[in-house]
Image (cartoon, helix red, strand yellow):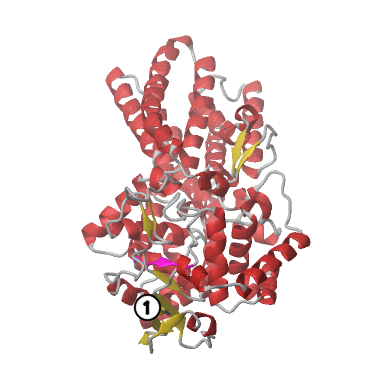
Amino acid sequence: MLLSLGPQIIFWYDRGSQWQGTYATLNADEFLYSGYVNALIEGRPRRNDPFTGRQDDATAPLPETAFSIQYIPPFILSSLAKLFGISAATSFIALAPLAGLLASLSIFWLLSSITDDHKIAGIGTLFVLLAGTFFAGQGLIGVLLKLDVVALGLPFLRRYQPAASFYLFFVFCTLIWLALDARSTRKRRLLSLLAGVSLAVLTFSYLYLWTAAVGWLVCLAILWLLLRPASDRLRSLEVFAINATIFILAAIPFGYLLSNRSQAIDELQTLISTHRPDLFRIPEIVGVVVIMMLVIFIRQRRIKLDDPRALFAGSLALAPVIVFNQQVLTGKSMQPFHYESFVVNYVALVSLVILLTLLGRPFPRAVLSWTAIVCLLLGLTEVGLVAGAFHRTDVLKDQMVPAARRLKALANQPSASGDPALVFSPHLEFMQMLPTWAPQGTLLGMGAIDFGSASHQERKEFLYTHLYYSGVTKEGLREIFRGPNDQLPLSYYVKYVVFGHERVRPLFSLNFQPITQDEIERELVAYDTFINSFSREQALKHPISYSVILTDRNFDFSNIDRWYERDTGERVGESMLYSLKLRD
């Protein structure tokens, strides 16, 4: 819990009395999730886009998205926030230590149930959660080896996916273990029912958790039914049958919602058609090592072939191989790095801990002590790394919170066009954080692909209009494409919108094709044509109602003032807030 709060404690200390309520970022995607939670707190429907201000209604229905389908975590978070009268940002601050606590308790419960050794379970919990980043090739090791890093710190704490439901995966595993171990028919059925319900909840919580859980359960069922004594198979079959039945019942409405999904989901998740195996990820290597050691120990008769602990460890070790290679049969792969960072890296380490306890030899106290110390040092390093990575942008967001709160107070004033009021700011950080605090949409519409509210062409229009109002010239866009350090987040976003995620970073594609200079030159010509032919008609497509600028920045309003009448402005904290009205 202390480590999960580490970045927030550092941020609180640095901001002191100037802190405006911003949460310390643990992952670059969290602003999308907090924006959605805030929209639910404000009473908006399940299908909405907090970044464009659009929401589902009879005249303009929105499709299903990953947010609206995986609805349980944000629904619970927003309900609790309304109950306690707190903001989305505060709920995210509270979620971090709660997720750390629940993750620790769930893994401790699983390990102690299997090993019957609380000391090993305690040290094992530290090892699994704090070394999980390292064994995903993320965080410190990813930075040092110059890998394509997507997660810093402790990835399981990314809010609210997977943080809010991460623990439930290991609760599910523990309930299955207890059900298989139960001798009472009533107890076995009750535990099986609880496990099935937890799997059903996972189904509407996070795709990569429930698919990993199903893959693991299939591995366990095969090993258990093949290798356990015949007298145990019928009882075991009942456990698996109950869980399969409940999962199928949950999968029916899930499948219906998925069939109504936005096509942008497939684009965003870079759904790939392939049968190519994926064999050399770190969690897979750990899992294969565990399986090889199990085979060696069984051949040496140090472990019995039908030992339930060995079968359980083996099933966990097989899970990474299954989830990374299911496309060999299905022909579909969808951003497998999510498994690597958020679930199967931890699963593989749990199997390793169980394997070490099967040897039957007590661990020396010095070994346990040094293991705990090394894990804590690794955890502190990872936490420090993520705190440093996002500190500058978090400070900028926090400085602009008063302006966002003022916009919330102005939210009852509709835009002249009747469309959702849009806000423009040249500061990318404000465009990210505004939906976490206020109901207005943003001209940049950074979540439009995630929430399925805009086509690819419309997202480019949002982007190019934003850049035009920001005073970005053709050569300025060229510099953004190059990605200087002070514009790196904007550079990534611009390239994502223009060329697609799979063309920007290798991890989004199995057949990565980098963006060519010729493609960039063509887009620069297209952008130059766009800004030189910008007209009132173009301004009317996405009319803006407000503009927010940091007071210490010199901003050229000439492109905005050409199309809008701007009031004298209102100073709010460290920002200037302007009301805009389209010129006749």
Q: Residue at x 26, y 55 (%)?
A: 80
Q: Which residues are magenta?
A: 439-443
Residue 500 position within the rendered picture, expressed as x and y whole percent measured from the top left: 62, 54
Q: Nearer the viewer, residue 540 or 470?
A: 540
Whether residue 7 can be seen here = no
Residue 419 lies, with reference to residue 233, above or below; the image says below
Residue 65 lies, with reference to residue 148, above or below; the image says above
Q: Residue at x 42, y 79 (%)?
A: 584
**Residue tagged by mark 1?**
403
Q: Residue at x 40, y 79 (%)?
A: 580
Residue 109 lies, with reference to residue 481, above or below; the image says above
Q: Nearer the viewer, residue 529 or 249?
A: 529
- Horizontal arrangement in the rendering, residue 286 relative to residue 51 (left or right): right
* Disc 1 residue crowd, few under 14, some 14–19, many 20+, Cα 10 Å: many
- Residue that lies at the very extreme toward the front in this rendered image: 584
Prevalent SS, magenta region: loop
User: Does the stretch in magenta take in 44?
Assistant: no
Q: Nearer the viewer, residue 286 or 501?
A: 501
Q: Amino acid at mark 1?
A: Ala
- Residue that lies at the very extreme toward the top in this rendered image: 230
Whether residue 461 can be seen here = yes
Residue 106 location, quadrant: top left
> Regarding mark 1 in the picture, which secondary structure is present there?
helix
Residue 202 position within the rendered picture, expressed as x and y whole percent measured from the top left: 40, 39
Residue 288 position within the rendered picture, expressed as x and y whole percent measured from the top left: 65, 34
Residue 297 position within the rendered picture, expressed as x and y whole percent measured from the top left: 63, 27
**Quadrant of the drawing holding the N terminus:** bottom left
- Horizontal arrangement in the rendering, residue 344 relative to residue 546 (left or right): right
Residue 197 lies, with reference to residue 282, above or below; the image says above
In this rendering, the count of numbered labels is 1
Q: Nearer the viewer, residue 316 or 557?
A: 557
Q: Residue at x 46, y 83 (%)?
A: 550
